[in-house]
Amino acid sequence: MKTQVVIIGGGPSGLLLSQLLHRKGIDSVVLERRTRDYVLSRIRAGILEVGFVNLMREAGVGARMDKECFIHDGTVISYGDQQFRIDFEDLTGSHVVVYGQTEVTRDLYDAREAMGGKIVFNTDHVEIHDADTDKPYVTYEVDGTEHRIDCEFVAGCDGFHGVSRQTIPLTVRREYEKVYPFGWLGVLSETPPVHDELIYASSERGFALCSMRNANLSRYYIQCSLSDSPEDWTDKAFWAELKRRIPTEAAERLVTGPSIEKSIAPLRSFVTEPMRWGRLFLCGDAAHIVPPTGAKGLNTAASDIHYLYHALVQFYETGDPEGIVRYSEKALARIWKAERFSWWMTNLLHRFPDQSEFDLKMQRADIEFLRENRAAQSVLAQNYVGLPF
Ligand SMILES: Cc1cc2nc3c(=O)[nH]c(=O)nc-3n(C[C@H](O)[C@H](O)[C@H](O)COP(=O)(O)OP(=O)(O)OC[C@H]3O[C@@H](n4cnc5c(N)ncnc54)[C@H](O)[C@@H]3O)c2cc1C
């Protein structure tokens, strides 16, 4: 088989790139290790920056999102029983959009299928060869049969545990990592959200987040120990703990119900450099991870796709390799700022096991300064709605 771009990974990064390239007449093949149903069953991000939303529209897959999404022009931050609102619209003239990653991925799969896009599922033993030459190729197996695709470029969109990053030699690759000493226990429930905007709650018992997917689908998280497992937490225990961490008036309004999904995600900051090696490009979680506190995971994936898509279009339309050569530099400049914001939000709102009384006072002073100071709120709001591409 031959194609212009092999895309490894059929998550949001890979699908979005494939769909955008298709609309510019650039051919690609997506290799996905799992089935479509498996990918769609993963409950993950839910907050989209306007930059991401615009890319979805440019890819021709914005119609359902525009109809069903919710616009959030602010968010609530609470500490103990006190709370205040960060008004994104007033501070930045922009907003974020609530539309689940599952729905984004479903729209992209539907569009790729409608346009005859080539997606190979259940691939095993994917290997990238000769990425540092002008003639890379990728081999993989399906049901024990080996296949080979010759191509011009390879996009590594295969998430944190994929093969693409590992293909870059250790003599070239440098990794930066911070692992946080806690996780997030998340519950999805078919109940109305407790509030029409997100509530980020800092409490003596740890962090909590009240989020949502739609008017009757809520997503709640509580900071938990890394040694916990979802089975340790009955629904009753989860709701009781959540109520203790959010302001009393919100706890009294909270509608509880059976969880339809419950999982624990560890928190990590991670960046690999460079994001290009020859004709191999890393995108999204394959290159970087953020703790979910700043809602940046999916959005940083989108900015990588923006840079790579424009670089490839520039190359195929004009022969100019400038975007390709500078892909890593451009993507990383934005990634590190999103990493900083996610790390800062995590430090601001969580309880750390080794925090001293002094550290707690500093954290409290930081939150109160944010409450009182418009410039500080503006910094948070600009980062939350998303820095420009
Ligand atoms: C549990 C969890 C919860 C999250 N919650 C949030 C959140 O609340 N907010 C937020 O902003 N972000 C969140 N994120 C992050 C966000 O979901 C990711 O940033 C986003 O999924 C990145 O998209 P991606 O396409 O780069 O990677 P992925 O979504 O990981 O997709 C990679 C794809 O590659 C496939 N793959 C892997 N290896 C191979 C291989 N060898 N060959 C072929 N295919 C392969 C995988 O099956 C997968 O489908 C969460 C992530 C996780 C893991």
Image (spheres, grey):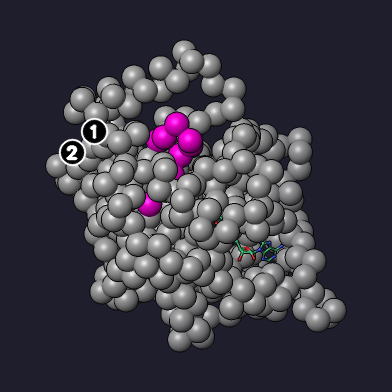
Disc marking residue 215: none
Q: Is residue 7 visible?
A: yes
Say which residue label 2 marks.
Answer: 91
Regarding ligand 1, which quadrant of the image does it lie in? Answer: bottom right
Disc 1/disc 2 C-alpha distance (Å):
5 Å
Tell me, yes or no, whether the two marked residues, 1 and 2, touch with CB atoms within 8 Å.
yes
Residue 246 lies in what quarter of the image? Answer: top left
Confirm or reject: label 1 Cβ below 8 Å from ligand 1: no
Of residues 74 and 127, the one drawn nearer to the viewer in this rendering = 74
Labels in figure, total: 2
Q: Which residues are magenta?
A: 202-210
For the point 38% across and 52% down, the residue is: 210
Of residues 324 and 55, the one drawn nearer to the viewer in this rendering = 55
- In the image, what residue type sits under mark 1? Ser
Give above or below for 205 relative to 289. Answer: above
- In the image, what residue type sits under mark 2? Leu
Disc marking residue 378: 1
Whole-percent x, y for residue 374 in the image: 19, 28
Question: Badge 2: how crowded within 10 Å, few (<14), some, or many (20+)?
Answer: some
Of residues 205 and 308, the one drawn nearer to the viewer in this rendering = 205
Q: Is residue 31 visible?
A: no
For the point 18% across and 38% down, the residue is: 91
Image quadrant in which the N terminus is located: bottom right
Task: Please tell me whether mark 2 sits on a helix, a strand or a loop.
Answer: helix
Whole-percent x, y for residue 28 in the image: 56, 72
For the point 42% across and 30% down, the residue is: 348
Whole-percent x, y for residue 278 in the image: 65, 49
Of residues 246 and 127, the one drawn nearer to the viewer in this rendering = 246
For the point 33% across and 57% down, the residue is: 254
